[in-house]
């Protein structure tokens, strides 16, 4: 990207680079819904069609859908955000949900209205095509890509090109299961080891010439059973990126388990075959692809840099003083960019939720403050505004304060991830969504976001074992289930400790079963144990890592020691002693574990 001294007015805001939409898909969806309602389209076929177009089933009903909208490479422009605001108000519940995979979800949409949403998305170049179903899902890219001080080059154009190549591509329409690509900038800002294909940009000097390429990891992923990915080779030149991608997708399509839905992600194929055998198969398949693909088959990588123009200020409000809370927000919600005088500011959301009115206001804020004129979705249910000039940060904070989006702690453990849980998901067993919000509110009240010892730790919560909340790579992770005392049931979580997704990627280990209404006190107890036994340079993340790997030398040496310390907090009271204990968060009725048919593998 090039940084210019020119300034832009809102009217100069850039439009989307790529039109991902096809308007005819909206018309086709409307016709197919009519045929389904008339009984002329069987339910299984309709489910596959619906998912292919990004409409996911909603809990316990066939009359509503969740529409998942892809943000390839995480990019979204102000006019697109305004459209989402309009659609969420008109056809959804007046709010949208930002996911951990750089998509936007609109919940509780009447099935007949899905086509209207697709039509509205097409107006602004957006699509929900292949956001669900057994296809190549949204291609992700770290929001720090292009601005990270540690990256070797910007991989965003490659993420866009990969998304463009596989979207509607016949080779990826009927895979054994969903398939995911993630690009990043560096080990710190990415999750490349826990995805089907993860890519980190690299530059190698070969015969005196610098060559771009990637470090590629294959076969990672989270779920009922999770795996860390393996590095394919030392260096993959950029010209081999597409050949490698095609080879891996073809192998998965050919050899993936289509019968056993519980074991049909690529990570199971890699595990069952063994890494060396799978690796050799990929390298051989790549050679075949390289030799047989038409010269026309190539990635359309657009290296045209975005022009960076600082927005024009209508008036100078610098004399109004710095608002309360600004220093706290600046510390916990911004990162310094490699471009001098600019920062990336992260907008904290509660478990990914944002109202339609906030979306509308956010579009104007992006125009007013981002010198690149767009936003990026993150990996942790937040939104990143990049290229914010440091002189503009106090004013940005004031504007976010006005619309209720100035919560601090975006880059700390006080912003937990929570999947949608029982608020809408058929498979969910607990209200993980609401629990994440309760933790966030309490931790901000306690000002834990200001504690540097807790800054790099994470809390991630899933409503079932399927890992939509990424609990397996959290410092403290939870996945939902049910438990019983006598005849009375209550919401319960399995707690995992020690997960991480950086260069030392490690899956969390199960430590204890924790009742939903005891999750907060249990986390606070673990923090208390850490403070009591930490070494001077420890963070909660490093301390729990040592405990989980049996390398800690304090009184708390193993996870079993933590388990013993929190045991008293996990004992359930009787229903007579504490009726509230038997209600899940957000519910006023007795807890039960009723679920519907999941569509992750439909």
Image: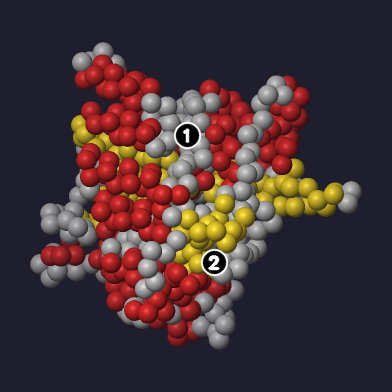
User: Badge 2 local density, few (<14 within 10 Å), some, or many (20+)?
Assistant: many
SS at circle 1: loop
User: Which label's residue is closer to the chain start, 2 or 1?
Assistant: 1
Real-space CA distance between mark 2 and mark 1, rounded to the nearest whole angstrom: 29 Å
Q: Which residue is mark 1?
A: 19
Q: Which residue is mark 2?
A: 342
Left or right? Give the position of 265 relative to 327. right
Instruction: Name the quarter where the C terminus is drawn.
Output: top left
The label on residue 600 is none
* Viewer can see residue 109: yes
Residue under the image location 71 percent in, 52 percent down: 202
Task: Please state the horizontal and vertical placement of residue 514, each as a whole percent of the image.
Answer: 32, 64
* Viewer can see residue 457: no
Who is closer to the viewer here, 176 or 124? 124
Residue under the image location 41 percent in, 45 percent down: 103
Left or right? Give the position of 429 relative to 309. left
Report how many numbered discs are placed on residues in the image. 2
SS at circle 2: strand
Relative height, residue 513 to residue 228 (above, below): below
Q: Which of the colour schemes (rainbow, by chain, secondary structure, one colour) is used?
A: secondary structure
Residue under the image location 48 percent in, 37 percent down: 137
Relative height, residue 93 to residue 281 (above, below): below
């Amino acid at each position: 990207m090039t940084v210019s001294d020119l300034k832009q007015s809102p009217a100069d805001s850039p439009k989307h680079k790529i039109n991902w939409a096809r308007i005819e898909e909206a018309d086709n969806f409307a016709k197919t819904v009519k045929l389904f309602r008339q009984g002329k389209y069987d339910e299984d076929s309709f489910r596959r069609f619906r998912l292919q177009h990004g409409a996911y089933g909603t809990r316990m009903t066939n009359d509503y859908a969740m529409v998942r909208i892809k943000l390839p490479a995480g990019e979204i422009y102000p006019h697109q955000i305004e459209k989402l605001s309009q659609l969420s108000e008109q056809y959804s519940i007046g709010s949208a949900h930002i996911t951990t995979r750089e998509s936007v979800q609109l919940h509780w949409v009447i099935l007949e209205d899905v086509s209207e949403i697709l039509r509205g998305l097409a107006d602004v170049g957006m699509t929900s095509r292949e956001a669900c179903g057994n296809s190549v899902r949204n291609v992700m890219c770290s929001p720090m890509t292009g601005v990270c001080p540690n990256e070797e080059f910007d991989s965003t154009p490659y993420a866009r090109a990969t998304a463009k190549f596989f979207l509607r591509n016949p080779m990826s329409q009927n895979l054994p299961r969903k398939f995911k690509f993630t690009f990043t900038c560096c080990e710190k800002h990415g999750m490349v080891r826990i995805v089907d294909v993860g890519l980190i940009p690299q530059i190698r000097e070969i015969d005196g010439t610098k060559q771009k390429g990637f470090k590629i990891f294959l076969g990672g992923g989270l779920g009922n059973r999770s795996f860390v990915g393996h590095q394919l080779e030392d260096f993959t030149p950029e010209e081999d990126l597409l050949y490698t991608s095609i080879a891996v997708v073809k192998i998965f399509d050919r050899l993936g388990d289509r019968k056993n839905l519980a074991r049909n992600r690529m990570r199971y194929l890699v595990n069952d075959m063994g890494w060396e055998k799978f690796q050799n198969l990929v390298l051989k398949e790549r050679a075949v692809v390289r030799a047989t693909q038409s010269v026309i088959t190539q990635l359309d990588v657009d290296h045209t840099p975005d022009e960076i123009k600082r927005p024009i200020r209508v008036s100078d409000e610098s004399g109004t003083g710095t608002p309360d809370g600004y220093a706290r927000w600046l510390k916990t919600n911004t990162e310094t960019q490699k471009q001098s005088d600019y920062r990336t500011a992260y907008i904290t959301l509660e478990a990914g939720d944002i109202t339609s009115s906030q979306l509308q206001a956010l579009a104007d804020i992006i125009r007013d403050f981002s010198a690149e004129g767009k936003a990026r979705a993150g990996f942790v249910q937040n939104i990143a505004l990049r290229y914010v000039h440091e002189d503009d940060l106090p004013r940005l904070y004031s504007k976010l304060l006005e619309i209720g989006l100035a919560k601090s702690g975006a880059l700390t453990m006080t912003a937990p991830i929570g999947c949608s849980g029982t608020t809408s998901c058929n498979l969910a067993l607990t209200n993980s969504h609401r629990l994440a919000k309760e933790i966030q509110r309490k931790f901000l009240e306690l000002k834990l976001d200001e504690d540097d010892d807790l800054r790099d730790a994470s809390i991630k919560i899933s409503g079932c074992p399927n890992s939509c909340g990424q609990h397996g790579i959290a410092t403290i992770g939870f996945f939902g289930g049910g438990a019983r005392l006598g005849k009375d049931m209550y919401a319960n979580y399995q707690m995992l400790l020690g997960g991480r997704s950086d260069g030392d990627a490690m899956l969390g280990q199960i430590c204890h079963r924790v009742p939903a209404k005891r999750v907060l006190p249990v986390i606070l107890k673990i923090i208390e144990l850490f403070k009591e036994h930490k070494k001077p340079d420890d963070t909660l993340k490093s301390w729990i890592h040592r405990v989980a790997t049996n390398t800690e030398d304090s009184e708390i040496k193993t996870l079993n020691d933590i388990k013993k310390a929190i045991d008293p907090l996990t004992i359930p009271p009787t229903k007579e002693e504490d009726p509230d204990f038997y209600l899940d968060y957000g519910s006023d009725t007795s807890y039960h574990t009723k679920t519907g048919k999941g569509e992750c593998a439909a």
